[in-house]
Amino acid sequence: MTYTKLASASAIVLAATTLSTTANAEDLTLCWAAWDPANALVELSKEFEAESGHTMNFEFVPWPNFADRMLNELNSGGKLCDLLIGDSQWIGGGAENGHYVQLNEFFDAEGISMDDFAPATVYAYSTWPKGTPNYYALPAMGDANGWFYRKDWFENPDIQAAYKEATGQDLREPQSQKELLQIAQFFQGREIDGKTVYGAAIFTERGSEGITMGVTGALYPWGFKYENTPGSYDMEGAVNSPEAVEALEFYKEFYETATPPGYTNSYMGESLDAFKSGQVAMAMNWFAFFPGLYADPNTGGDKIDFFVNPPQNQAGSTLGGQGISVVSYSDKQDAALEYIKWFAQPDVQAKWWELGGYSAHNSVLEDPGFVDSQPFAGDFLEAMGGVQDFWQEPAYAELLLAMQKRIHDYVVADQGTAQEALDLLIEDWTEVFEDEGKL
Amino acid sequence: MSDRTVDRVAQATPERVARKIRGLSDRAIAWIFISPTIFLLLAINIFPLIWTIQLSFTNYKANRIGREVKDVGLRNYERILTDSDTWLNMQATAHFLFWTIFFQVLIGFTLAWLINKKFKGNDLWTTIIVLPMMLSPAVVGNFWKFLYQPQIGLFNYIVSWFTGKDPSSFEMLGSVTLAPWAIVIVDTWMWTPFVMLICLAGLRSIPDYIYEAAEIDRASKLRQFFTITIPMVLPFLMLAVLFRGIENFKMFDLVVQLTGGGPGSVTELTSINLKREAFEKWRTGYASAYAIILFVTVFGLASIYVKALNKVKQR
């Protein structure tokens, strides 16, 4: 009898719990780009579903269309996304145009501290105006542009001897941008295993952001700056400084002398294809792809290794990565905030890194075992210490497309000089800032 | 009592409705019938056009809802017309327009002339020739992108077979000099069948007795071609040129798939630039002015052309 009563009471409690969970359960949609880390996030989010009772749906858009698709969604006040992992450059527009929910009060209420995340990622992914304690996103995915290479070729004694003979130096991971070019030129057109191979795959894509993300990998190490004084929009002498001109000439030389034929409009996908098909000795790409590259059965494992974007006058890497924001047009903001609260937990962040995502949480990055946890983990930490990002202004799309045009015109289409390209870029950017009322 | 359908319908109309209709004039009834069409035309065509004209005098940005919209007068027009990049886009468009039409007319007419000759397998060849125009431009763009690939592309191998050059020594889509021709080749491949079909219709509309009369007068084949065939097909040919001209002036999808407007901006046609201004940079006011300029250009050129076409028809 007692047993029956106990069972009945348990059943009632269980039913009540289930009913209460079901009553608050929401169908949440998270929007992001379609790439390897997105698959890891789907896996990770299953735990959130189990814990919260909410259902997670995902809208992943291929990178070339990601900005177009998502910015149109935001600009039209669309309700497709409750959560958005948007590019770092969108933060200004997201905040000023009211697309993103400001998270300060929520963070305070839930005890989420931005001090728990890597400062560079908080600055880049979360704050607007830049550097102020106004948060519109939680750092979700740290990323930077790095390099990977054919370790088996670099360790091949015949190739090492040939390199020594050609350059007088040892073949190793490049320590400077100029050494990087020298190695790429050495491999260009070389016969390896009966096949002609090339130096390196770099970004040259014209339509979205490709060539800008690639060329800044050279500009930043040379000391490129967007403004003489941050926040003043005084670009003359900074954007077209002699160092910037030299860096741009370097990137053009790299494109002309050390890349495979036909790579005139290439970005992430083409870089991965070039490497995986054994065409190139080295390639640039985002750290986000490195777990997948390492796991590749043909060119991964012992055959691959990674290095941070080499310095020249200084260290410098192009920032990638994104923060996760709650879309202000969502009707399910409470559930979306619940997801962010769950995602910010150190143990969830640790699992995120384990699955292939790049956590920006200090508890993960400062863990003594982090550097050895993956062959690229140390490089990732080093890169994140020297990252720079493109303009994050609300008019970032205009600024980006102007740079895409000027750089592609010079590097790929061989029109004008590096000095002219950068002078014209200043003209374009000045016009944009005048329209914005900032100049 | 009449058994005609019209009478039966009239008798079936309820008296109350019939009385109302009887009170309307023919003109009023005509208006009732065409008013839905006029409403749709106003809503879908005229209103957006007027709104676009209005926006073209402002600094409006569709992605900045709360931003103050200022009247900038003719500044957008002035900026567009004095921007050297605009004229480079116009030049790229003119190059594309001229050469695609030239080759499509030349090859399309030749094919139509050959197909018009009765031979075995005539229908099969016609079907094979018109296949490219049945494909989606996105598919054609991607397909040709592979063909033009310098390392594995069939196009480069065919050229190298004829010229002895290394296939990877030239890049159809990556070279500043070759890329404008690469897009001309693809558009010609895709749309020549359309011109061929129109020319074929023209050729088949020429009555045989005209040629028979010419034969009796001992006119040579060449003379028949220039004095009968060409003049009688000319109105059809001009119509094909008009269709292709308007289509190619607003060419977007195929070229975006092939080159994305590059290398640099050498294949950035006006429509690609317009899309970038309107939906990537979100300069709505500026893009509206750009659209109006293009509209006036196409409308003006098409009007002049249609007048010429009518003159040819009247001859």
Image: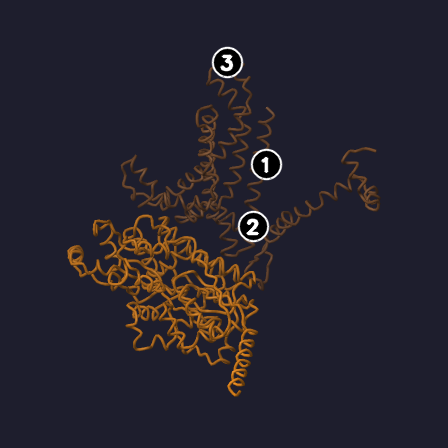
Chain colours: A orange, B brown
Residue A102 position in % (x across, y down) = 52, 73
Name the spot of residue A213 as percent of width and height, x first. Answer: 38, 60
- The disc label shown at residue B215, or none: 3
Secondary structure at numbered mark 1: helix
Residue at screen point 54% across, 78% down: A15
* Amino acid type of the residue tagged 3 in the rendering: Glu
Q: Is residue B8 left or right of residue B68?
A: right
Look at the numbered discs 1 and 2 and tell me whether their residues touch, using CB distance below 8 Å.
no
Cα separation between marks 1 and 3:
39 Å
Disc number for residue B289: 2
Q: Is residue B66 above or below residue A262?
A: below
The quadrant in which the C terminus of chain B is found is: top right
Spatial separation of the CA atoms under disc 2 and disc 3 = 58 Å
- Dots 2, 3 in contact, CB < 8 A: no
Q: Position of residue A228 (x, y in %)?
A: 40, 66
Q: Which residue corresponds to mark 1?
A: B303
Q: Which is closer to the viewer, label 1 or label 3?
A: 3
Q: In this rendering, do the residues under marks 1 and 2 share a single chain?
A: yes
Amino acid type for the residue under numbered disc 2:
Ala
The spot of residue A131 in percent (x, y) is: 44, 73
As helix, strand or loop, the secondary structure at mark 3 comes to: helix
Mark nearer the viewer, 1 or 2: 1
Estimate the spatial distance between the alpha carbons at disc 1 and disc 2, rounded to whole Å.
21 Å
Chain of the residue that carries numbered disc 3 in the rendered image: B
Q: Secondary structure at mark 2?
A: helix
Residue type indicated by callout 1: Ser
The answer to which of A227 and A170 lies nearer the viewer is A170
Mark 2 or mark 3, earlier in chain = 3
Left/right placement of residue B311 relative to residue A366 reads right
Kindly indicate whether the residues beneath marks 2 and 3 are on one polypeptide chain.
Answer: yes
